[in-house]
Amino acid sequence: MIVVMKVGSPEFEIERLSMELKSLGLTPEKIVGKHKVVLGLVGDTADLDPLQFQELSPWIEQVLRVEQPFKRASRGYRHGEASEVIVSTPNGEVLFGEHHPVVVVAGPCSVENEGMIVETAHRVKASGAHFLRGGAYKPRTSPYAFQGHGESALALLARAREVSGLGIITEVMDSPDIEVVAEVADVLQVGARNMQNFSLLKKIGAQDKPVLLKRGMAATIEDWLMAAEYILAAGNPNVILCERGIRTFDRQYARNTLDLSAIPVLRSLTHLPIMVDPSHGTGKADYVPAMAMAAIAAGTDSLMIEVHPNPSKALSDGPQSLTPERFDRLMQDLRIIGNSVNRWSKTTVWA
Amino acid sequence: MIVVMKVGSPEFEIERLSMELKSLGLTPEKIVGKHKVVLGLVGDTADLDPLQFQELSPWIEQVLRVEQPFKRASRGYRHGEASEVIVSTPNGEVLFGEHHPVVVVAGPCSVENEGMIVETAHRVKASGAHFLRGGAYKPRTSPYAFQGHGESALALLARAREVSGLGIITEVMDSPDIEVVAEVADVLQVGARNMQNFSLLKKIGAQDKPVLLKRGMAATIEDWLMAAEYILAAGNPNVILCERGIRTFDRQYARNTLDLSAIPVLRSLTHLPIMVDPSHGTGKADYVPAMAMAAIAAGTDSLMIEVHPNPSKALSDGPQSLTPERFDRLMQDLRIIGNSVNRWSKTTVWA
Amino acid sequence: MIVVMKVGSPEFEIERLSMELKSLGLTPEKIVGKHKVVLGLVGDTADLDPLQFQELSPWIEQVLRVEQPFKRASRGYRHGEASEVIVSTPNGEVLFGEHHPVVVVAGPCSVENEGMIVETAHRVKASGAHFLRGGAYKPRTSPYAFQGHGESALALLARAREVSGLGIITEVMDSPDIEVVAEVADVLQVGARNMQNFSLLKKIGAQDKPVLLKRGMAATIEDWLMAAEYILAAGNPNVILCERGIRTFDRQYARNTLDLSAIPVLRSLTHLPIMVDPSHGTGKADYVPAMAMAAIAAGTDSLMIEVHPNPSKALSDGPQSLTPERFDRLMQDLRIIGNSVNRWSKTTVWA
Amino acid sequence: MIVVMKVGSPEFEIERLSMELKSLGLTPEKIVGKHKVVLGLVGDTADLDPLQFQELSPWIEQVLRVEQPFKRASRGYRHGEASEVIVSTPNGEVLFGEHHPVVVVAGPCSVENEGMIVETAHRVKASGAHFLRGGAYKPRTSPYAFQGHGESALALLARAREVSGLGIITEVMDSPDIEVVAEVADVLQVGARNMQNFSLLKKIGAQDKPVLLKRGMAATIEDWLMAAEYILAAGNPNVILCERGIRTFDRQYARNTLDLSAIPVLRSLTHLPIMVDPSHGTGKADYVPAMAMAAIAAGTDSLMIEVHPNPSKALSDGPQSLTPERFDRLMQDLRIIGNSVNRWSKTTVWA
């Protein structure tokens, strides 16, 4: 941490502050600049809040952080190596990570009935998907919109898992539901709106299933890594980060702005695997293929794509869902891009 | 709802779509424009999702909503009249609403120990505050930062309530904690990061204590009113809306951008009382007085201001906290502005 | 400037870098922290680009600026004193500044014809305005929208000035027009869309008329002060800063987000006078009064308000214009708020 | 245009408004809904401002636009066909467009001296670039930063053009400079900060050289297409749209947020060719390759990449510039992605 003093700070105040900093266990090193005095703080400052320091003296102009606030999530924590998240599914282990082929998660926004979820599972598996997504509990902007079928939908996901062999990824919205969701899900999703629901993060970090952490609509990269840090610090090392579009001033055509630069940025900062969700990221089926292609070219480890057997009848998110046919065509295009960057599975995944 | 067809839509497709809309219980009225055909949908469309409609035909260009998506929160729901939220405190009833004096809520970010919370309560009461705020459960960006003292802090808030007579406003972060918080709090706060934690909203809407709903960092006015709608629809009519700054591109000096235009906008859209929190809204104590003054001039019904006996030692949010002395001076200035717009209590509030 | 080295930076690279920094005329002071080495650069660093420094070594993690990039615009440049901008108008001198009454600028978005501009001038003067605004050259999003009457409108402004005695504020959009506009205008306005038209800023800084510099829609406070710095550095010290709303994710009700916290932030950073434009800042006449009141309470030095004799017939910006009657009522309310903060002229301005 | 009346609008007001609309040459068609009355306006409404209409009656709730505000820029204007921009360079014609190979523009931020610009031209040409970029006039945030060498730099660009045969793309910042820049440049660039400098757009639209129009930092897709419309309406059909990152709340790692979804969005809305600038779009050389790859996968027609022989000594934008070596490696990777989507030139471009 670096403390920048205001122009004209009295010498005795700098002395007083230095003493106070020492009493906090830090060693302040003073640099006398042309206009300003700067104190470099040597010691364990990673957990300290720069803004809090600013209150130590009215003569402090600003406090700059030198250490990153995230630790377990940082790339340095694993000495620069990528981590991999291994998920056991009926069809076998699936590995998420920088040194593995792109993992594809597909399925409807919400589980509507047995027929549609089983059909979707079969269709997306046939096209090469590795996981089935589908919401049992749905965060909806309106209390009058379809809220998901809850526990009964979990049973349908279990059925789809059984018949297709695909792993299941589904969302937990409230801490009391973690246990029941974890009985069915192979990966627990924390949605964008709950990315800073810290109580949920702590509790989901205290159970064993891998976690898919979606980026909040207004979350900076640092906020997002700190949310992952909550899960890691609670003991669960298996976190996948999913970019799903941020909120910006332009929401007329694409509903969110898919921030694909998050891929190289995260790669440099963290060892955790990266997923991209172009369906929520754009909000419109027509834009999904281009953004899925781009995500692979930019280096994503995984994709999440909404697929619905009949988007016009979907109870939620129809406009951003692909039909199974369109998803199948997209998978063929993704294979070409994926092969060109050596990130596509050489063998058919499922025997 | 209005459906705009693309230029060149075939007549038979417009017919087919009209039939489908009728099968959904709507009456489509066709307008043939110079370039485009438009279908106005007569019927109960308020709950329908415009994006969903877009999937009904590839020839649909856009679907425009005519009805507001919020009902119970809308000003029209009360025929244009403001509602008032009445809170019983040991010192007597406090009324929040457009036709009442500005209510002032003050106190520290978090409850640190009995001495500081009791002292703060006495000090802010002496300056004219009506409620004491103080966090027991704290949403912090870092898992390594102080997380609040939890239940033991609730006991300290109860103690401060008892000795000062002030009502208590404190945050609930997780649905299992609602009951224990509601035993102490006079108003339950839902924080900005949980504004779209819909499970929490439903459960907090199913209990009786009034609710303070903070605006999410990236929540539109409409998102925010829909979050209030969750609480109202669950049966709790006592919701106060608190603007606390939104996230924008400029975070260098003020940490958030306090959106004071939310005051006249909300006034025109909803009957619910409005609060402004200039402490979180700016993140810096030096900017708080100007923004508190402005909020009253713009017509807020209530203010929430962070006050800490010793901001430089605060365990959280010190930089945006006023000292009791500075708060007292601010209250004198607020009285002048409040009187000039006839929104300040004529009598000393507490005998 | 402070250079933070990556963890594990080799000693010889730190040495090499230190030599290179010395060759640039700087004195690097090394602080060896627990994990990282930091170099504090003593010397004339205000003009240096921190990002540029990052390229000096692949081992540099980040470069932090300690000095503010603006100089002439900084409050420190005038030793903490506010500056005042004095404008001669036919009615007498008007002073903009922290220690003067609030100056009110009113008038239509664009000059439509002699009748309307002269009538508006008389009406706003009667209500207490000090300046007439009115566009001759109009920046319009669409090339098919009314673009302003240009030079002929300047003649009408001259006429309105003559008959009312009010000073004129009008926009210059292109550097070749500066001279002709300056013949009529008492204050030259640089619009939000041209805030970083640096060629225009340099040329407008090289002439004598005071300049009203509107904040760009996506300009940070720092960007804005740097734009002012262009004008100041070119020799013109008379710059007024006008907040007119920034672009954020919520544009549904208010078209822009009026950033009133810019008032206390600017006050702490710069000596320049501050103006607020609630008409563009909200885009809707109904929200203008609340925001004008708030701006005065927050400490603005000046207000710009759109007034049109018949907003529904206005050729531009009708929806955000007040009628003369509504403006007159607003001025009475502003007087009350203005008096309560001792920022309203005690005497009728114009005899 | 569709006019939505407030609940409870009196019948006579709807009649009065209908008459007024007829007097404007429009045919209002009335739809009586369950709660509201809606008027569909048949006639030539594309140029009308919806906000303006709102002023026609206090009973109007909202006015919705059905027509797109851009015409010449719309895809429909060319009956769904892409346009191509053909630029003659000493090496031959280069074609920008959806049905042509990706065009690569490379070079330094600013022209510093003859040696560096000529060397860069040779190097980027050898790697396969089609155009040399380089700034003579530089828009810089600070008046104290290097402002470009102006006219003398234009002479150096002419020299680089002559010796390399590459076409030249360089920025015009001020309308009086158009002529002198057009003497050297094969494509005139309008920078992000001047995207809504409408005077410049009109004048640049009145000359013959093709125009590269960068997206403003806070420009919506619609704003951007309207800016293109200014140029097209002034008579110049050769406009290329360049996405270069928008300004969002997260600026810590990437300086801007590169909006790659602009590619499929623009493709559906306009016939104009699309370029992506990942150098400005991210602000950091390390992120450029991933984003350049992604842009091609997403379907861009062209790329602009900053290359500098010695980024650490660059007078501007060093941190986002690639070295010639790194650019050469990137071009090899781009060729692989480009081939996989059939958008890479089969033959070596330059003999």
Image: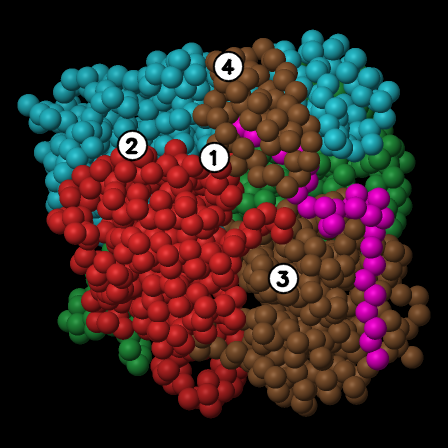
Chain colours: A green, B cyan, C red, D brown
Residue picked out by circle 3: D201
Q: Is residue D102 left or right of residue B44?
A: right
Residue picked out by circle 1: C312
- Distance between the Cα atoms at labels 3 and 4? 46 Å
Q: Nearer the viewer, mark 2 or mark 1?
A: 1
Residue segment shown in magenta: D61-90
Residue picked out by circle 4: D12
Residue D99 % position (x, y): 87, 56
- Distance between the Cα atoms at labels 1 and 4? 19 Å
Residue found at x 69% / y 65%: D206
What amino acid is at disc 1? Ser
Q: Residues within 10 Å of mark 4 (few under 14, many from 20)?
A: few
Residue found at x 13% / y 49%: C347
Disc ID at residue B300: 2
The local secondary structure at tag 2 comes to: loop
Residue C107 % position (x, y): 37, 47
Position of residue D21 relative to residue C93, above or below, is above
- Distance between the Cα atoms at labels 2 and 1? 30 Å
Q: Residues within 10 Å of mark 2 (few under 14, many from 20)?
A: many
Residue A270 % position (x, y): 59, 55
Report which quarter residue D87 is drawn in: bottom right
The local secondary structure at tag 4 comes to: helix
Query: In terms of depth relative to the viewer, which is nearer, B51 or D75?
Result: D75
